[in-house]
Amino acid sequence: MTGPLLYEWRRIRTVRSTWLLVAVGIVVPAGLAVLFSGLGQSTTDQTGEPPAEVATALAALLPLAAAILCTVGAASFGQEYRHGLIRVTLSIFPQRTTVFAAKLITVTVLVAVTAVATIAAIVLAEYLGRLVAGAPSGWPSGVLGSLGVIGVLYVTIFALIAFAITALTRNQPLGIIAPIVLAVLIEPLIGLIAQSQFWTWSDWVLPFSSGQSALAVGGAEAWGHIAVFFAWFAALGIAAWLLFRRRDA
Amino acid sequence: MTIDVQHVSKMFGSIRGVDDLSFTVPDGKVTGFLGPNGAGKSTTMRLMLGLDRGQGRTLFDGRALTDYAHASKVVGTHLDARPFLPGRSARDHLLMLGADARVSNARIDEVRATVGLADVARRRPKTFSLGMAQRLGLAGAILANPQALMLDEPANGLDPQSIQWLREFLRHYASQGHAVLVSSHLLSEMQLMADHVVVIARGRLVAEGAVEELSARGSDVLVRTDDVAVLRAALKARGARVSDEGGNALGVSGLGRDDVGRAAFESGCIVFELSERRASLEETFLQLTGDGQEFAFGETP
């Protein structure tokens, strides 16, 4: 397994776009967090609860970070299929499950580490923004607990769903666009319809609605939502793995 | 290392792309893999490596490729003209390919120099010509110094000097006891490069053997005489296949030059010309695969 992991690490690290996406995934949400903290000065002044403000910023900005970083997930298989490199890879590593696992592990670790950095950058930016604006500036230590973990899981699972869709379809643009369109357009529309019909199940069934609910609510409910989100990835990931083992490269 | 291809088959819907194909790629020789367009050469190579799913099996020194811990040390492959990311530098591409075999930086530099890419290490391959892309593909194939090489049309896009270099390089590589399988449409080139040939058409084996042996199959004897009818009858009586070449000449196959001369003498014919006609690999190839072309041309206007 060391060989495939080293191969994947070199594959991902020697592409400039990887680091560009990682940088954008950290800097853009952090930059927006500074803006939000400035705009939200009056609210912060009234409530005096910085952690709540940080939680709101994370719930608003982590989906953006996830949408950027899902490109890293999609590129894992997408670049190889697009440029015919998958045949070279499978000639070097004929055991397909090993190749799939190495890709999965590499994407998971890279996106998870980036998500930690993104959350840290958002919290820091929010804190600095409030300091500059003269708002109450208590350090939001609560975010380092379950909310932070949920945030990392949300971003990582989002990217892994893009990874699985690309592996299933062998189409990188689709692997990027499908999760974003589902998260931004289709699921919110279904959610609106569900709301008008007083259906309460949509946040517990739809993948990206579940993921976003996990960021918005706290406690055990958040873990339930993130479990639904993960279950969707697991289903797509298992289907992608089975297909990858069987079909022509 | 010897490669044994055993009863390999592949269906594309209802079409049989590769049909129960068995052949051997011996070590120490360059084996040419020939066939018309659509004959199934590339598919066969992918099946041999387990890249495409099908029936049959391929053994590398008696073992499946999946049984080896480091497949890149067993067989190096170059199957597509541009199998790399356009934005990744040539050196980084080779660094990635050498990860499993723990190829050193010195070896990467050595291979780049061997294929003539020493000066473009930091360049991104999106600017490479087809010939340079082929060189990078070959560099990837030989990086881990594998026991066997499988190259699909490696001479495409190369200039004459590069083709000559490739020919000498592959012959040298094979001479070190390695098995080398090369598919190509350049039959004249293959005649110079290959020691052994496998010919397929419509996914089936048409011929396998040494290049000389195969060329001999398409060779015949030309005899020009004063009495074509008498000599034709005498040759047919000896089991030869005879064709009329015009100008009192006959083409004779199935008998050697000496036997044709003896037949002429015994039948009382005067012989004006008696010569052996050696077929080129291309002529033999066309004879062997004449009706095996998947996508045939129309008549030339």
Image (cartoon, rainbow, N blue to C red):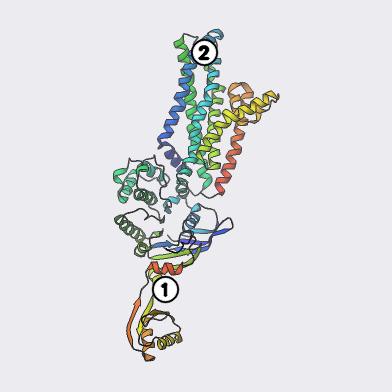
Q: Look at mark 2 in the image and give the residue it sits on.
A: A40
Residue B166: which quarter of the image?
Answer: bottom left
Residue A114 rendering spot, x and y as whole percentages: 47, 28
* Position above or below: A59 against B249: above
* Position above or below: B134 against B216: above
Asked if residue B42 can be seen in this view, the reply is yes
Disc 2 residue type (three-letter): Gly
Asked if residue A145 can be seen in this view, the reply is no
State the separation of the CA atoms marked 1 and 2: 89 Å
- Part of the protein shown in magenta: B77-84
Residue B95 rendering spot, x and y as whole percentages: 38, 43
Disc 1 residue type (three-letter): Arg
Q: Which mark is residue A21?
A: none
Residue B268 rendering spot, x and y as whole percentages: 37, 92
* Position above or below: B271 against A82: below
**A190, A50: nearer the viewer:** A190
Helix, strand or loop under label 2: loop
Task: Identify the residue at horizontal 34%, vertical 89% (top origin).
Answer: B270
Few, some or many residues within 10 Å of mark 1 (<14, 14–19, 20+): some
Q: Look at mark 1 in the image and give the residue it sits on.
A: B217
Outermost residue to the front: B301
- How many numbered discs sit on the rendered protein? 2
Task: Identify the residue at horizontal 29%, vertical 44% (top origin).
Answer: B119
Instruction: Give the main secondary structure of the magenta stretch.
Output: loop
Give the side of residue A145 with respect to residue B60, left or right: right
Give the side of residue B151 with respect to residue A99, left or right: left
Give me the chain letter of mark 2. Answer: A
Few, some or many residues within 10 Å of mark 2 (<14, 14–19, 20+): some
Give the side of residue B192 with respect to residue A74, left or right: left
